[in-house]
Amino acid sequence: MSTALLVVAGYVLGSMPWGYWLVRLVKHEDIRRQGSGNIGGTNVWRVYGWRLGLPVVVLDTAKGFAPAFVGSLVVSDLAGVLAGSAAMLGHSRPLFLKWQRGGKMVATAGGAFLGVAPLVGAVGAVVWIAVFLLFRYASLASMLAAVSLPVAAALLHEPWPVIVFAAIAAVAIVFLHRANIARLRSGTENRFRFRRAAQPVAESGVARGGRA
């Protein structure tokens, strides 16, 4: 199996917008018009509860894990990194949503690292869970987990493709959370609630036509 084929497969898998598809299938609604407007599992969970949110998180993680794991196992670490990167890009700009804005790549990145460097992925997962439980800001947990990836990769003496991948992924994830950073600084970021609201309420960014 060639690296190019793995990259294409990674992008196609990453482009599968499970948050959008599952909400359409079950609720007959467009998740991009609800909550933060994001297609990822956090927004689906916040708006519709864990019964939809959890499957989205699992599927978004799996679509990063599968191409990265196969690439690193069958070809090389570099092939796994490139396939995982392609899956993240697909999640951010999905082919199946006509390349419109997708998700913020957090779960997909986590899956990719579990595929190419399981210990690094595990460190990121532990950081995410710890920060989330302490502060209940999914955005803060995501950014700190992302920043932990290159640090863990370097400390664990991972191959150079994994370290570079971790650094680029961290920068990309923080960049995609720039609106969240502004809200955290102003004190207007919403804390995650495990019990969803009775009715989905659009946040201010969606109301103005933007996405958080």
Image (spheres, rainbow, N blue to C red):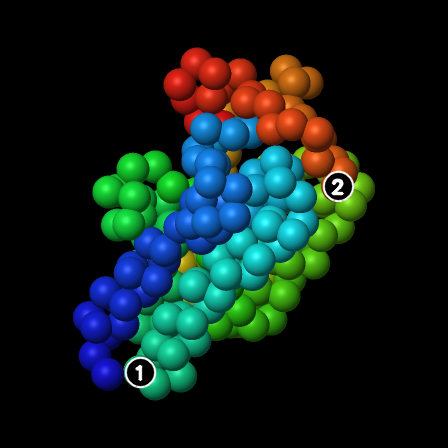
Q: Residue at x 48, y 72 (%)?
A: 115
Tell me the kind of residue under disc 1. Val
The image shows residue 197 at horizontal and vertical percentages of 70, 30
**78 left or right of 205 in image:** left
Q: Nearer the viewer, mark 2 or mark 1?
A: 2
For numbered disc 2, what is the local secondary structure? loop
Residue 75 is labelled as 1
The one nearer the camera, 19 or 191, is 19
Disc number at residue 194? Answer: 2
Query: Crowdedness of circle 1 by 10 Å Cα count: few (<14), some, many (20+)?
Result: some
Work out whether mark 2 precedes mark 1 in sequence or the reverse, and give the earlier one: 1
Up-down relation of residue 55 to residue 53 (above or below): below
What's the amino acid at mark 2?
A: Phe
Q: Position of residue 84 (x, y in %)?
A: 38, 63
Q: Are marks 2 and 1 in contact (CB under 8 Å)?
A: no
For marks 2 and 1, give the CA distance: 41 Å
Q: Give the number of the disc on residue 86.
A: none
Please name whichever residue, 27 or 61, is drawn nearer the observer in this view of the structure. 27
Residue 140: % across, % down? 63, 37
Residue at left 26%, top 50%?
A: 95
